[in-house]
């Protein structure tokens, strides 16, 4: 049976994985405190830039480079953005799941027209 925390685990919990990544980053970061927090937030911008680079590479928009990425590359970069954002959120609060779930419910209600406060 596969370990729940192994990369290919069929039933790996997203939130446990985010917490594990957060612990690993905190244990291996040369920066902590406010500086570490700010650098963790900046990492998100770097990842978003990699999405843009992959889209440009998948569409061949840079004539000097041509088509150097695939849409699978774009998918992987989008996943990196999501993971990085959730790890950054975990850096701000140990209640990552609750904060995210509550916010997702608000955005969903507002966007789908089920928000009573609209």
Image (cartoon, helix red, strand yellow):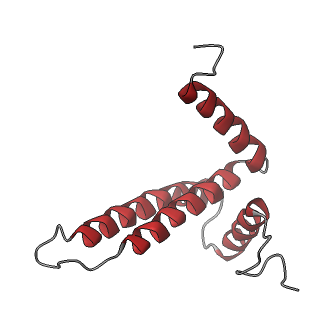
Q: Point out the residue furthest to the bottom here.
A: 1
Q: Is residue 71 left or right of residue 58?
A: right
Q: Point out the residue furthest to the left here.
A: 63
Q: Nearer the viewer, residue 41 or 60?
A: 60
Q: Is residue 86 above or below residue 62?
A: above
Q: Position of residue 73 (x, y in %)?
A: 41, 74
Q: Position of residue 29 (x, y in %)?
A: 63, 72
Q: Position of residue 6 (x, y in %)?
A: 76, 81
Residue at the image position 57 percent from the left and 55 percent from the top: 85
Q: Quadrant of residue 115?
A: top right
Q: Is residue 67 above or below residue 106?
A: below
Q: Quadrant of the C terminus?
A: top right
Q: Quadrant of the N terminus?
A: bottom right
Residue at the image position 15 percent from the left and 70 percent from the top: 62
Q: Is residue 99 above or below residue 109?
A: below
Residue at the image position 52 percent from the left and 66 percent from the top: 80
Q: Quadrant of residue 47?
A: bottom left
Q: Position of residue 117 (x, y in %)?
A: 63, 13
Q: Quadrant of residue 71?
A: bottom left
Q: Nearer the viewer, residue 31 or 92?
A: 92
Residue at the image position 68 percent from the left and 34 percent from the top: 105
> What is the tally of numbered marks visible in this picture?
0
Q: Is residue 26 above or below residue 68?
A: above
Q: Point out the residue furthest to the right here.
A: 1
């Amino acid at each position: 049976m596969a370990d729940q925390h192994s990369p290919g685990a069929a039933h790996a919990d997203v939130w446990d994985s985010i917490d594990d990544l957060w612990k690993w980053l905190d244990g291996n970061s040369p920066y902590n405190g406010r500086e570490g927090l700010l650098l963790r937030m900046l990492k998100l911008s770097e990842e978003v830039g990699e999405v843009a680079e992959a889209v440009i590479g998948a569409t061949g928009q840079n004539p000097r480079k041509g088509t150097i990425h695939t849409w699978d590359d774009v998918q992987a970069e989008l996943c990196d953005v999501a993971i990085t954002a959730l790890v950054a959120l975990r850096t701000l609060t140990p209640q990552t799941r609750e904060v995210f779930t509550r916010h997702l419910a608000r955005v969903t209600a507002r966007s789908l027209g089920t928000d009573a406060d609209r």
